Amino acid sequence: DQLDMAQLRYLGTAVNQAMQAEQAPLWASLARAARFLPRRLAANLAQTMLGAHVTANITYHLSPQEAIGIARHFSIPFLADVATHLIPERSQPLLNAVPLPTMQRLTKHMTKQQDFATMGAFLDYLERDRVLAIVQHMQKPEAILRTAAYCQHKAFLAEIVTDFSDEQLLDLLHAAHEHALWEEVLVIGSYLSPQQMARLGQLSRQLSLEEAAHAAETLKQLSLETALNPIWEAITSP
């Protein structure tokens, strides 16, 4: 069987953690040195000399406040590069401490760069309110769905979707058809509460015949006809 994107991400993280363990003393030493430097100077050295990979590993040995104090002087492109080298599991306190406006600017940049894998990995470890604010900031439904593909905690995403307006949910359905991302929508939908699933079923009645046909085909492939019965009935009823 082929690994899905979330499983591939998990495998990559395991390899990365093993490699980092060997060099942990070096990262700790660099972190101690960084504490004695003015924040702006430390940020300048990180961007001009150390690079994103080394900088990411140093953050594990700094407090969230120390890391954010340095990172606030980074350019957004460099901050995005650092983010790609972070292990979300080890960065959860830091990710939830970064000022939301910075996270939103970072999201905008990474969406433009189509770095959906990194964003999806982060969403698994962010607090609910932050996830909602970041997802709403993505604006494009396609970006939300492609990011969701890399999230492991689909039930958590289903909770976030409950805060979407009917218009936003319908936009997701249209984007799923336009970009062949029905699986992402339907898998998340399978974790919805009965009330929210009924809501999605009602919205599904507004799909075109072509959209409904493709959604029904994907439901069959995923064997979710029963689990998503309100949606199944909405798109298959005459």
Image (tube, rainbow, N blue to C red):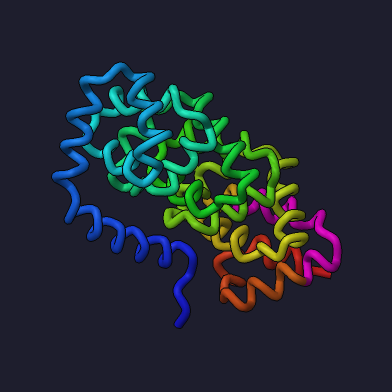
Residue 100 is at least partly visible in this image: yes
- Counting every numbered tag in the picture gives 0
Q: Residue furthest bottom?
A: 1
User: Whole-percent x and y of residue 234?
Assistant: 74, 62
- Residues 136 and 219: in front is 136
Please determine whether, in this image, residue 226 is positioned above or below residue 57: below
- Residues 237 and 74: in front is 74
Answer left or right for 150 relative to 62: right
User: Whole-percent x and y of residue 132?
Assistant: 54, 36
Answer left or right for 166 relative to 100: right
- Residues 142 and 37: in front is 37
Please determine whether, in this image, residue 20 is positioned above or below residue 40: below
Residue at image coords 37%, 37%: 49
Please tell me whether residue 201 belongs to the stretch shown in magenta: yes
Q: Residue furthest front?
A: 49
Q: Quadrant of the N terminus?
A: bottom left
Residue at image coords 28%, 24%: 66
Please determine whether, in this image, residue 174 is positioned above or below residue 237: above
Please tell me whether residue 118 belongs to the stretch shown in magenta: no
Q: Quadrant of the C terminus?
A: bottom right
Q: Quadrant of residue 181?
A: bottom right
User: Whole-percent x and y of residue 216?
Assistant: 71, 71
Answer left or right for 195 relative to 57: right
Q: Main secondary structure of the magenta part?
A: helix
Q: Quadrant of residue 214?
A: bottom right
Which residues are the magenta region? 197-213
